[in-house]
Amino acid sequence: MTSLLPTIGAMGVWGYWVIGLMAFFEALVLTSVFSPGTVAVVLGGALAAQGLYDVGDMIWFVTIGTILGAEASYRIGRHGERFFTSDGRVLSTANLERGQRFFAKYGAASIVIGHFLGPLRPIAPVVAGLSGMTPRAFWLWNVAGGCAYALAMVSVGYFFGTAFSVFGASTTRVGLFVGAVLGTLFLLWFVITRVRRSLPLLMSVLRSVRVAVHDNLDVQGLIARHPKRFRFLARRVSRQTFTGLPATLLAVTFVYFLLLYAESVFQLLGHGPLVQADTRISNLFSTVRSDRLNTFFTIVTGLGYWQTVCVVALAASALMWVWGRRAYIPALWIALVGNVTTVSLLKLAFARARPDLALYAENSYAFPSGHSATIAALSIFLTYVLIRERIGRDLLWILTCFTLIFLVGLSRLYLNEHFLSDVLNGYLVGALWAITGIFLAERFRQRWQALDLQATRRGRWWATASVITVAAVALGFVLEHYSLTQRQVQPAQQAQLDIPFDQALEQGILPARSESLIGTQQEPVSIILYVADDQTLLDALAAAGWRQADPPGFATLSRAAIAAWLDRAYETAPITPVFWNGWPQSFGFEKAVTSEGLRQRHHARFWRARMKAPSGLQIFVGTASFDIGLKWGLTHRIDPNIDLERNLLIEDLLRDGGLQQNGWAQVVAPMLGQNVVGDPFFTDGRAAILSTPPVTGGPPATK
């Protein structure tokens, strides 16, 4: 991608034509083997993400190229099978047989599905021509498939292009965030794939266990003594009727999610560890924002918007009606309406305010997340329908379902519209209503099976293609309108204190100790700095011999891990995030120990206070400690005497950093404590007050 993006990007407006032609040649059966059309389309989306092309124009060029290429393949197919040979690469009899089986299984829908299936992509139109599909019917399905393919592949490229552009500088927090998202998605797909592939073996083992238990003489005697109870249990696990094993599994799943939901509510009411971490996680997300990620996640979060969901639900209902699966329709809408009603009532009941750093203005309360609940209810229910009706590959639908749910929830966190506990609770509400909808759908299927009417095949082709096309266009307009009409929140003004900053620490108005992600208190503040700006702080520490730590990223974290394990030097290794007043440190600094590797180092953290002194100086608070070795091979162990490290840092700043001392603040009482990993420390509880000279109207030189 590093070499291809600049090459195509340098073509200017001709890049649209190049990518459109590549899409055409890949859809054309005669040239598909030579054209990396899908790769080019994804690259086109990536270029649009970087601002070199317009994403809408890119979608149109890809759509037209794909449709024309498939149309040409269809025309070739209408001339018969003489083009296919046993030794051909694409026009081989083996590919033809695969395409015929695929077309026989999915019918005209294979034209849409085939656009996404690599080798079958150019074959499906040929088979349609061989099978006698009318040109008009093929054109409708081809337009629907071409639009869907272009929208999906360009969107994938746009996502990865955004990730690539912000991940290129891998030493930034943004790059680490993007890498973490991609890594989480990969792990999610891996786990789902493994679980899905393990199900046949698990079911085989369970059947063997059931047979062994049933044939046991003692069990036979127990069944003979309690025939009614065991007949009831046998009906509950019977696979012959819905009221047997399917209903039992749904009930168990519903109860499980209900218990999880109750636990999430108790976490909120009891201010549990997850809720305590909410603000800190929200603040962490605010530190990785970028314009491209803002645009991407605004579009993603729009997938959970009520208008988007209505478009998808109406399209799904129309397709269910056309294909005679009308029992699903009321169940779908009951699940969606019930979900929206439940979320609205819960928001009013808990009345939880949204995060302070929300990117967009929202008028409703935070708990639970309506977007997360809605996408979970809709995605799970539609995935059930697709798998139940044996449409496509179930693993593909499951992966797509969980990916959508994950990304929409992540978008609510990234945009700071919700806390983590809001999103997780929304997932649970949506899952509960999806399960309810599935149960109702199965009941309706039993009662209304005789009412399912059969439409003509030609009518289904026309209707399905029309519904998909209209829905895709409407979805694009809704998402664009949503992203353009969001009203951004104005940045909050810096807070003002009525008393000196050091007194606010002493009196508990501001936290006097640093914190872990879940709020566990750690070392107390040991330094208070009054400086002109960030650069003044950086210059002072650099002059004092302290080097700024590299921001966390894949490259820096990997280098730090290797240096720590091998005890090699890395004088600017990243420092683990620690929080003060809910925020991660603004800067980290370290001073290497002569002739020692990374296992021993002096390090300090500084947090920028969200307020300024009356003199206009920026206030920083800091802590310092000395790493004396590794613990568990993963984290550092600190020297218990943190005052000694504080004094070393103060001496360096006074001697070489150009700062002056204005006194001491007794922020906490002398104490013994331990950090989040259990390392003990002791301190006299004092914090040195330092500033850049002279300080007019600055902190008083007291204590």
Image (cartoon, rainbow, N blue to C red):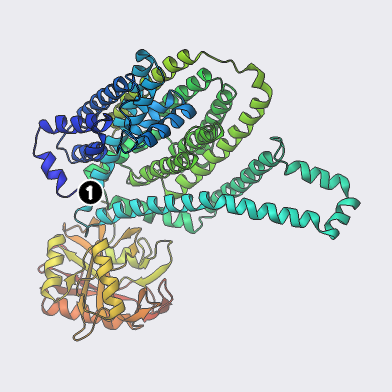
Residue 49 appears in which quarter of the rendering?
top left
Q: Is residue 300 left or right of residue 699?
A: right
Q: Looking at the image, which is closer to me, 311 or 688?
A: 311
Q: Is residue 363 visible?
A: no
Q: How many marks?
A: 1
Q: Looking at the image, which is closer to me, 246 or 394?
A: 394
Q: Name the residue at 25% across, 23% down.
A: 68
Image quarter (top left, top right, bottom left or bottom right) of the C terminus: bottom left
Could you tell me residue 212's position as x and y percent? 75, 57
Q: Is residue 328 left or right of residue 465?
A: right
Could you tell me residue 671's position as x and y percent? 41, 79
Q: Secondary structure at mark 1?
A: helix
| Residue sitting farthest toward the right | 225
Q: Is residue 334 visible?
A: yes
- Above or below, comparing residue 677 to residue 583 in the picture: below
Could you tell me residue 378's position as x and y percent? 49, 33
Q: Name the residue at 19% across, 59% down.
A: 618
Q: Amino acid at mark 1?
A: Phe
Residue 403 appears in which quarter of the rendering?
top left
Residue carrying label 1: 164
Q: Is residue 17 left or right of residue 501?
A: left
- Above or below, comparing residue 469 to residue 350 in the picture: above
Could you tell me residue 183's position as x and y percent? 35, 54
| Residue sitting farthest toward the bottom | 595
Q: Looking at the image, which is closer to me, 206 or 586?
A: 206
Q: Is residue 611 left or right of residue 241?
A: left
Classify mark 1: residues with Cα within 10 Å, few (<14), some (14-19) or many (20+). Answer: many
